[in-house]
Image: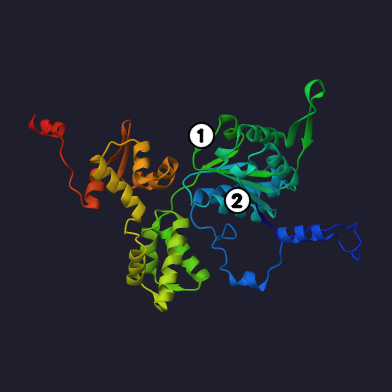
Amino acid sequence: MVIISTSENSDSKSDKSIRKPKEKTEKSETLKPETTLLDKQFEPSLRPQNLNEYIGQARLKELLRVCIGAAKKREDITSIGHFLLYGSPGLGKTTAAVILSRELGTEAKIFSAPALAQPKDIIGVLLSLNPGDVLFIDEIHRLNKITEELLYSAMEDYVLDLTVGKSLTARVTRLPVNRFVLVGATTRLGTLSSPLRDRFVHVYKMEFYSDNELVQIIKNSSRILKYEITEDAALEIAKRSRGTPRIANRLSRLVRDYSQHENISLTKKEDTIAALELFKVDPNGLEESDKQLLRTIIESYDGGPVGIEALAATLGEERQTIEDCYEPYLLQVGFLARTTRGRVATEACYKYMGFERKRSDSDQMKINI
């Protein structure tokens, strides 16, 4: 769990002269620790802190500005509605939730869906929310059925329908919870159940970033990471970032490390190319694992089609890893195609990887005809 807050709970009825129990003191310090010298030695977060610093996702920023502004004019920030953000990993879904809470002046409590495996988990979370808090659930499509159904009444009526007792003495009790804003994030919108999806007021698809937007992000990150980089060098990183800020920041850190190791005060384009080639990131953003997948399809399966299970077994990877991590970008750049019979390497893939496609007997027959 991640709690973002600058306020501390206080008990007006307690006597300050009376020392609190040790367990409560430790718990309070764990949730909201003071900044120490050791904390200052770590690199600051690269996440933007407000809407003005948030680069890219123009439609989402405009949506947030309108909804937040209207809610503040109504003096009811909880009426803003729930948000569902979907799209590829690393495009800023968590960042958007944190910024939303900061703009509303409330806390953001961040959880991953697998961490809410038991009904008691989501019940405890909902009861701990303060009015206006932002509850962010990542990979929300992975919630189990019971946990998901508990969210229905909480999202609509801000109550929890709980069954108390057993057998003939069982009865349903409605337990009120504070009004909150739910932000759900998913990479698989189609697997989300209709009852849950329909309860979100705002459904938004996260878009890939342009090279110019990524250049701005990289230059901002370089200032935070305290190294200088030229415009051309930032553009070189952006071109290899797959349109994803998370990857851009990761590559920016690698280039920073290379520059500091080589005692380079101003990182130029040639320094960036040398660094990324050292870390095996090619000009199209493909890494060695991506190329290994393409080579396997071409060399072991004659370019395909090959089933995903056979491909996963050959590579020694999980099916979900291939579908979620490798395939989306390879499909986007046109190196891979999905067919009813399996995955197929495209002509562009053969050309890029330096292979010559072998013509089958059927292809030769078509040519002769």
Name which residue lies at 76% across and 40% down.
Answer: 177
Name which residue lies at 66% across and 48% down.
Answer: 134
Lateral position of residue 116 relative to residue 56, left or right: right
Query: Label 1 crowding class (10 Å Cα cut-off): few <14, some 14-19, many 20+?
Result: few
Q: Which residue is mark 1?
A: 191
The label shown at residue 97 is 2
Lateral position of residue 55 relative to residue 11, left or right: left
The one of 105 and 286 positioned closer to us in this rendering: 286
The one of 112 and 321 positioned closer to us in this rendering: 321
In this view, the residue farthest toward the left is 368
Q: Is residue 353 above or below residue 149?
A: below
Q: Position of residue 81 (x, y in %)?
A: 64, 41
Element type at mark 1 = helix
Q: Position of residue 114 (x, y in %)?
A: 59, 43
For the residues carrying marks 1 and 2, which lies nearer the camera in this image? 1
Lateral position of residue 339 relative to residue 255, left or right: left
Please, what is the three-letter code of the amino acid marked with disc 1?
Answer: Thr
Q: CA distance from mark 1 to mark 2?
A: 22 Å
Please, what is the three-letter code of the amino acid marked with disc 2?
Answer: Ala
The one of 11 and 361 positioned closer to us in this rendering: 361
**Residue 286 seen by the camera:** no
